[in-house]
Image (cartoon, helix red, strand yellow):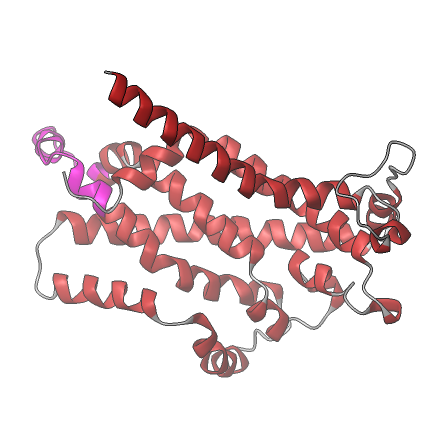
Amino acid sequence: MKKNTAIQIVLYIILIVFAVLFTIPMIYLISTSLKPNGALYEYPPKFFPTLKSITLENYVYIINQGKFYVNFLNSVLVSTLTVAIAAIVSSALGFCIGRFRFFGRNILFSFIILTMIVPGMTLIVPQYELAVKLNVINKLPGLIPFYVAWVIPYSTFMIKGFVENIPREFDEAVHMDGGSILTVFIKIILPLAKPGIASISIFNFLTAWEEFPWANTVINDNMKRTLPIAISGFFGQHQFTQWGYVFALSSLSLIPILIVFISFQKYFVTGITTGGVKG
């Protein structure tokens, strides 16, 4: 018993240390956003601003700058639609691959998984050529299909694992009551796979919300930019980087992420531990 207790104490200490290490950058981000721009170049640097030096001028500038709301809404729109479309497509794919036996099933699934190992940056050029042909350059909706394509493989992998863990007796019961395959999918699979859908939704939201290289490549109009591009706009502005504005805008960009994570938190751990593992 004492040995187990000692091991638990060590594990808790390790977890606390890692939690602190991962929290420090966020604390520094927020504390720095509350400093005047001039205070950022003080030496020796201070981790926290003094009570007298705390200011909201960086936030006031960001909010009063009209483009913030537009960039924020652009990111919300793109991320939300990416999550919704990816959830529908990956749920259907995961259901088909995980529930049915058909010719080429394993080949199809292997192909989907193999796409996960392709570095995203190697796809920029062919994706750009495709975007030109589809006439979606400098158009906000043009980001969504590419984001969906990026997250589908992992999402399908997770949902397939959940589907395989759901007993087939449920399907048989639905069929005995005269239900169709669509009824099984809507009434059985989707409700029971809710933790998996929630967990992939968090990952997919983060992917779309934080994505920078592709959006910066195809979007040139300031009013169509997403938040990551808006943040990059402060680098080198006025001959030097406006770090106060960068940290303030970065802090504001955390709000939707926290809202999404808190909303789906109860499903998150179940989703990442159960998905992809056949019981």
The stretch of residues the image draws in magenta is 161-184
Q: Image check: 207 left or right of 178?
A: right
Q: Predominant secondary structure in magenta?
A: helix
x then y, percent, for residue 161: 22, 45
Report the number of numbered marks: 0
The residue at the point 57 percent across, 42 percent down is 257
Point out the image quarter for the C terminus. top left
Can you tell which quarter of the image residue 32 is in?
top right
Task: Return the residue nearer the eye: 245 or 68.
Answer: 245
x then y, percent, for residue 250: 69, 50
The residue at the point 76 percent across, 47 percent down is 248
Q: Verify whether residue 102 appears in magenta.
A: no
Whether 128 is drawn above or below 59: the answer is below
The residue at the point 24 percent across, 47 percent down is 276
x then y, percent, for residue 157: 27, 53
Whether 187 is drawn above or below 35: the answer is above
Residue 13 visible in rendering: yes
Q: Verify whether residue 175 appears in magenta.
A: yes
Q: Image check: 163 left or right of 250?
A: left
x then y, percent, for residue 159: 28, 46
Q: Image check: 177 left or right of 250?
A: left
Whether 238 is drawn above or below 18: the answer is below
Residue 182 visible in rendering: no
The residue at the point 23 percent across, 68 percent down is 111
Whether 168 is drawn above or below 154: the answer is above
Point out the image quarter for the N terminus. top left
